[in-house]
Image: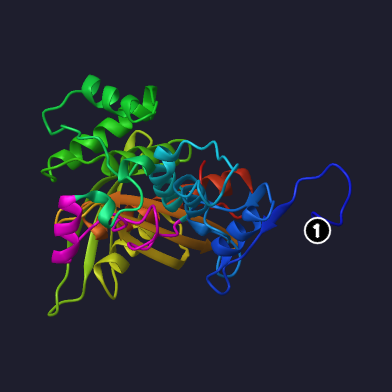
Amino acid sequence: MIDNVRGDFVASTHCHDDLGLAVANSLAGVANGARQVECAINGLGERAGNAALEEIVMAIRTRPDYFAGVRVDTKTDELARTSRLVSRLTGYHVQFNKAVVGRNAFAHEAGIHQHGVLADKATYEVMDASAVGQEAAQIVLGKHSGRHAFKDTLEKMGIHVQGDALNASFVRFKELADKKIEITEADLEAIVAEELGIGMVQRYSVCEIELHGGTAMKPSARVVLEYGDGKVEATGSGDGMIDAAIAAISEATGVTGTVGNFQVSSVTGGSDALGAVAITVDADGRKVTGRGVATDVVEASARAYLNAVNKLVRLQERGDVREVTGGP
């Protein structure tokens, strides 16, 4: 194309990953004169996805000997954080062994790998983890931390919130700090993302969730929700505790929807990991996505469903039947 087409144009690649070659094909295009690559963070896209932005950027940055004369102006240390943000907003989780941004991309379990990395990181690591933002700064926050320290830490992470969003995020942080020993950067990102996502559409908020279940009894739940200046209480039962919590929320709000896609992932590791839930709810043609985070996946699921219910309530108030997948 470059040899035969005349005029002022930029050669571009647009590759999908049907055979797992989107990145390889895109890079081959760059090596042969393409100066635009159409790609997506985490490789999101139609069918098997588009070429992964983070892999293309780091391949070019890591192998300047091969891609001579090609320069990519990207803040690579924001790649991991951007990947997590996109994952939370879309509900599409990143596999642990995903190149560049996966949780295990720079983890070493095999003894020979550990020995080699301790001797010289370049033995097994072709790039520095900190170059893509995989080594989060050490954050010392706990249940005794104040609002100022919380806000200062967020600002150092590049997250600027204020007013009601800051207050709501701080309340969730204090709740989490009472349950977790270590508060990580990923935890803080998840908390703030949830609060920013529900802040403009919140009609109901969680006050209490009480759950009963086991192999010898039918799971049941009791919820108390704040609504305006008052509270509403309801109970429900189901096939499991999540199903029971959803039934109780539906009873309390008067909004019933069919749960479609349901995804659960851990924000961090450990038995006290913060769980993140993303679900889609369809109610009379109105389809929304809800998200919730908590150290208990049942609570996170309930919060995600209530987040979806709040969006449905707002859509009903506006008489809007659009599909809402994120944001207010």
Instruction: Classify 230 as above or below 124.
Output: above
**Residue sitting at x 14%, y 74%:** 214
The spot of residue 106 in percent (x, y) is 28, 54
- Whether residue 166 is in magenta: the answer is no
The spot of residue 113 in percent (x, y) is 19, 62
Badge 1, how many Cα within 10 Å: few under 14, some, many 20+?
few
Q: Is residue 173 visible?
A: yes
Q: Considering depth in this image, is 284 or 44 the residue closer to the camera?
A: 44
Instruction: Classify 207 as above or below 234.
Output: above
- Count of numbered circles in the view: 1
**Residue sitting at x 56%, y 52%:** 324
Q: Using residue 1 as the reference point, say whether residue 293 is left or right of it.
A: left
Instruction: Classify 219 as above or below 309.
Output: below
Q: Considering depth in this image, is 33 or 255 the residue closer to the camera?
A: 33
Instruction: Kindly report the secondary structure that dominates the magenta region of the rendered protein.
Output: loop
**Residue furthest bottom as drawn:** 216
- What's the image's color scheme? rainbow
Q: Considering depth in this image, is 32 or 148 the residue closer to the camera?
A: 32
Q: Secondary structure at mark 1?
A: loop
**Residue sitting at x 29%, y 65%:** 242
The spot of residue 26 in percent (x, y) is 61, 59
Could you say which quadrant of the image residue 142 lies in? top left
**Residue furthest top as drawn:** 148
Q: Label 1 belongs to which residue?
A: 1
Q: Is residue 322 visible?
A: no
What segment carries the magenta color? 91-119
The quadrant of the picture occupied by the N terminus is bottom right
Q: Considering depth in this image, is 233 or 293 the residue closer to the camera?
A: 293
Inspect the image, locate mark 1, and give the three-letter code of the amino acid beneath it.
Met
The spot of residue 241 in percent (x, y) is 24, 67
